[in-house]
Image (cartoon, rainbow, N blue to C red):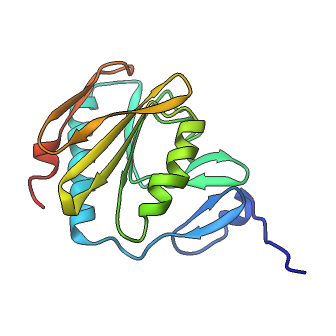
Amino acid sequence: MCAIEYYTYEDYKLWEGKWELIYGQPVAMAPAPVISHQTVMVAIATLFYIQLEECKECNVLVEEDWKISDDTVVRPDVVVVCGNKNEKYISKAPEIVVEIVSKSTVKRDEKVKFSLYEEEKVQYYILVYPEDKKAKIYKLQGNRFEKEGDFFDEIYEFNDIPCEVRLDFKRAFKKI
């Protein structure tokens, strides 16, 4: 008989290295991301930050823990979270979650996290594919994500979060 290990946030806090905890199961994060991953992540975070700098309600965070429950902690690449009062970790669903997709994370980002973020009522989920200079935006409609489209060099406006913001994909992909 094989026992499946089950972990909680208390266990997670003790781990060294970069991990996520999804439904009690540890998931090792990939080694240091490639330069295109980091470049696009910094560009998106910067574009959001500049626009939200004066917004008192919303923050832009990079690779910050989001404690969804005692057995689920994820670390999205970039989030815009509004009204989060916890100083140790993200404690509510972000308005926008961005995951930079790589070959090693594609299944987790497109399937596991897609379902998790949809279930947690994230308003916008953006999957970014640096090698294709493409992003897919999903918007929560009721209880389901609906695809807004594929974006290469367009500008997308997020006008239904507390502080309006837009994302210029031409600028986000400029340096890759």
Please state, as top left, top right, bottom left or bottom right, where the N terminus lies in the image. bottom right
Residue 37 % position (x, y): 27, 63
**Depth check, front residue: 124 or 15:** 124
Quarter of the rendering containing residue 74: bottom right
Q: Residue at x 56, y 45 (%)?
A: 115
Q: Residue at x 64, y 68 (%)?
A: 26
Q: Residue at x 63, y 72 (%)?
A: 15
Q: Residue furthest right?
A: 1
Residue 147 % position (x, y): 36, 35
**Depth check, front residue: 23 or 149:** 149
Q: Is residue 47 above or below residue 62?
A: above
Quarter of the rendering containing residue 39: bottom left
Q: Residue at x 73, y 65 (%)?
A: 11
Please state, as top left, top right, bottom left or bottom right, where the C terminus lies in the image. bottom left
Residue 12 % position (x, y): 67, 64
Q: Is residue 68 visible?
A: yes
